[in-house]
């Protein structure tokens, strides 16, 4: 298991973008929390200060983008999406 940063224990904050994506991608907050509990790893995102959380949902790989809000001690969920295999 990865050595998770301290922000992993902070309360979640869900953005308006996340709420729209939730509807588009057919999952809810309970599903998101389950995905985060099953997370297997994380890495830096292309946007500085954000992290990509690697997980699974409905037997598929998913990624959840989060951004720690240090002053408020919140882990802001920006979006979540299934990982699609690249065409060869």
Image (spheres, grey):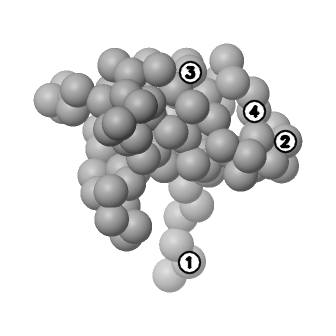
Task: State how far apart marks 3 and 4 are (Cα).
Answer: 11 Å
Q: Which residue is mark 4?
A: 27
Q: Which residue is mark 1?
A: 87
Residue in the image at 45% along x and 44% along y: 66
Does residue 6 appear to the left or right of 50 in the view shown? left
Kindly indicate the quadrant of the structure image that contains residue 77: top right
Q: Which residue is mark 2?
A: 23
Does residue 72 appear to the left or right of 14 in the view shown? left
Task: State how far apart marks 3 and 1 are (Cα).
Answer: 30 Å
N-terminal of the pair, mark 3 or mark 1, is 3
Q: What percent of the width, then of the height, locates residue 53?
A: 40, 42
Q: Is residue 2 visible?
A: yes
Q: Residues within 10 Å of mark 3 (few under 14, many from 20)?
A: few
N-terminal of the pair, mark 2 or mark 1, is 2
Task: State how far apart marks 2 and 1 are (Cα).
Answer: 26 Å
Residue 30 versus residue 36 in the image, above or below: above
Q: Which residue is mark 3?
A: 33
């Amino acid at each position: 298991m990865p050595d998770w940063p301290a922000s992993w224990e902070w309360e979640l904050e869900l953005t308006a973008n996340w709420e729209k994506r939730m509807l588009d991608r057919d999952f809810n907050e309970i599903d998101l929390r389950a995905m985060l509990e099953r997370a297997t790893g994380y890495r830096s995102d292309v946007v500085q200060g954000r992290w990509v959380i690697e997980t699974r949902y409905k037997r598929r790989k998913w990624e959840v983008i989060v951004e720690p809000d240090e002053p408020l001690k919140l882990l802001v969920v920006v979006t979540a999406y299934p990982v699609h295999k690249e065409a060869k």
